[in-house]
Every structure is written in structure tokens, then in C-alpha cells.
Image (cartoon, rainbow, N blue to C red):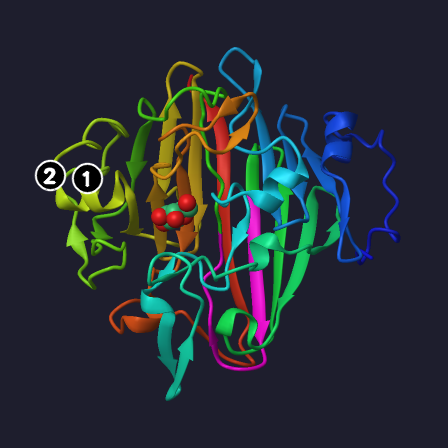
Amino acid sequence: MLAGLSACVVSPSHREHAPLDQQRVSAFADTVNGKTVKLFTLRNKSGMAVEISNYGATLVSIHVPDQKGQDGNVLLGYDDIKGYYNGKSYFGCVVGRYANRIAKGAFELEGKQYQLPQNDGLNSLHGGVNSIDKQVWDARIMNDAIRLTTVMKDGDNGYPGNVKLTVVYSLRADNRLVIDYSATTDKTTVLNISNHAYFNLTGDPSNTILNHEININADAFTPVDSTLIPTGELKKVAGSAFDFLSFKKIGKDIDQEEQQLVFGKGYDHNFVLNANDGMSPVVEVVEKNSGRKMEVYTTQPGIQFYTGNFLNGSEKGRGVAYQYRSGFCLETQQFPDAPNQSNFPSAVLKPGEAWKSQTAYKFSVLK
Ligand code: GLA
């Protein structure tokens, strides 16, 4: 049973949680290992609506008006819950226990060696196999929010410690989707939790994202080896293809014959954010045809800018086969492979500590 669901009766006419479409609610309803899988909706008075599944704590759609007031979904996703069971691209889900990569799936912590599943060549990616993105979370409906909780058990995917993880999605009146993460552990562990939403601000995922303009407030990024593990260097972006210090089209330099872009098949890199107080945007993206703008706020030190380079038409939804570079991700995070890189901010969580982070995606239109 989903904790809190039965205690909290929400009439379908309650505007803040009214479904967008009853057929979709059915397409996303299921029972997995005795747990209810359900589609939740958050709406605000400014025309935004967000669909969330408690399977993988997944953002299923984000509806936001364009400059002409026309509604559009800016998220890549599948058309039913089975798509998410089989999905390989991490559409919209929460990733952990360690988002992004750990080299060779191995690390040492307090003198002990840990071995994780190697599910990305020799490396471990996004917490391993059947991680939290493939689990049914407990859900509780709140006023303007959905609160999702799960437990990552001691030894799951090779990681130490029982970790209690809570993710709260709130939709604010000013078109901010706020994600509050919090976690505790009973043994020292490593933790990196992110959301893996793919955006396409045109509202039509048959378009590529190459004409979106992006501004990333990061003077440096972390270059990678050919397996996308950081080399440890913090490299200045100024003057390079990685320089997004002022607005630049995603497509402008993406096909440069540059080793980092060749390794990533495009951008698939962690940017070292200049500020992470959560108060000013770390990234701004604009798409001029729709007039949509998205700002990202975070308290995390890094952000993975990934341009959908592994999409190849094999995953389908919304009437399209998602093509190469038809969505981009801005995954706020600790740095990839931090458990093996002593010069990166620590991603260690100890018993007695309360880990918290906040990320917000704020939508508006160009004036
Ligand atoms: C992350 C990684 C990418 C890719 C996607 C999932 O963003 O950095 O390399 O693995 O997840 O396809």
C-alpha cells in the first residue's frame, strides 16, 4: 500500500490534482510487487501541469504555455507505465544511489573496498541495476506537492547502508517546479541523487534541441576519458566549445572535432557551477520559436549537461521515435566519480547527518 494515499482523499475535481486525461491515468496505473503504481498531477493557476509517477519518482510530463499561451509538453517520455519499466534512457526519473558514473564500479570508503555492478562498459552508471529509477516509491499527496519516499537497502547494488530518501516535487504559482531531496543513512555511504528529465522546449519532440540557446554559469567543467570518467582536471571553459558563459546555441560548437565532444558524442559533461546557493539561476535556456524559457536553480555543486547523444530512435513516445539530440538533460549533482577523486567535493554521507538539496526548474516566456 502507498503510505498516505488512503488517508488523503482527493476528489478528482480538486483543481490542484485533477488529472489531465483519464485515459492516461489508466495507462499509468498498475501494481508491482503488491505496490500501487499511480499517476499524480500537480497544477497551478498559471497554466502549468506536471504529471508524476511514483514508479521511479518520475516526471512524466511538464505542460507549460508558450509565448502565445498555447499549452505544450516540454518533457520526453513514454505513453504508458510499461514504457518506463522497459526504458533504457532514464526519462524523467530520479537516479541514485550514485547518479552518473563510478569508475570500474569500484571505490574505497573507510578502508573498505566496494564493488558495484558494471552496467556501462566497465563503469557503474546511475546506481546500477534495478535501482531507485525502477522501484515503486511510497507517495503522499500534499497541497501543491507530491512527496515520494523510498529506502535503498544496505548492500543494494553493492552500496553500504540503509538510506532513506525523500523527494518532494512542488509546483509553485510562479511556474517553478521545485525538487527537494533529503536522505539519511545508518552506515557511511556515498550518495549522488539527481533527476534525469529530458527537455525539449519547442513542445514537439520531433525537433532536435540544437537551436535552443543556453547559458551555463560555470567557468570550468570536468573533462573525461573515453569512458566518460572525469580525469580529475577542472578545465576552464573560456573560448572553448564548452563556453556557455553567455547565451549560445547548443548546436553551435557541438560537432567540433574536439576530443571531449568526440568522447561524449556531443555534450555529456559535468559543469562546475560558479554559485550554488539556490538563489540565482545556474543555467538559463531559451527556445525562440515557442518563446519558452527555462531557468535552473540548485544547491548542488555540479550539473551534467547531456544533449541526448545516446537517443537513436529506439525509444518511442508522444507519436515519435526519439532521435539523436531530441532532448537535453540538466542533471544537478555531485561530481561524477567523486568517491574516487579526492579533489572533488565529497559525496560521503554519514550516520547522523541529514543530507538535503534543492533544485528548481522555472518556466516563463520571452517578453
Ligand atoms: C547520463 C549520462 C549519459 C547517458 C545518460 C543515459 O546523462 O551522463 O552518458 O548514460 O545518462 O542514457
Q: Do the residues labelled 2 and 1 touch (CB within 8 Å)?
A: yes
Q: Residue 55, percent across and down?
A: 66, 49
Residue shown at 56%/14% (left/top)? Answer: 69
Q: Which amino acid does label 1 sit on?
A: Asp
* In-image side of 35 versus 227 (left or right): right
Q: In this view, does 195 lie above or below 127?
A: above
Q: Can see residue 5?
A: yes
Question: Is 91 included in the stretch rendered in magenta?
Answer: no
- Residue occupying the point 70% across, 41% down: 144
The CA distance from mark 2 to mark 1 is 6 Å
Left or right: 265 with respect to 321?
A: left
Q: Is the magenta stretch mostly helix, strand or loop?
A: strand
- Locate residue 62, reporting x and y percent: 58, 31
Quadrant of the drawing holding the N terminus = bottom right
In the image, which residues are magenta?
A: 178-194
Q: Name which residue lies at 82% across and 32% down.
A: 14
Q: Which of 305 and 216 is in front in this view?
A: 305
Please name the amino acid that badge 2 sits on: Gly
Quadrant of the image occupied by residue 324? top left
Q: Does the residue labelled 2 lie within 8 Å of ligand 1?
A: no
What is the residue that sits farthest to the top in this orientation? 68
Count of labels in the image: 2
Number of residues whose C-alpha sits closer than 10 Å to that of mark 1, classed few (under 14), some (14–19) or many (20 or more): many
Picture coordinates of residue 173, whole percent (x, y): 62, 33
Residue 357 versus residue 268 in the image, above or below: below
Residue at 52% x, 69% y: name it. 157
When the figure is inspected, residue 185 is found, relative to residue 301, above or below; the finding is: below
Q: Mark 1 points at which residue?
A: 243
Residue 279 visible in the current orientation: no
**Label 2 secondary element:** loop
Residue matched to label 2: 239
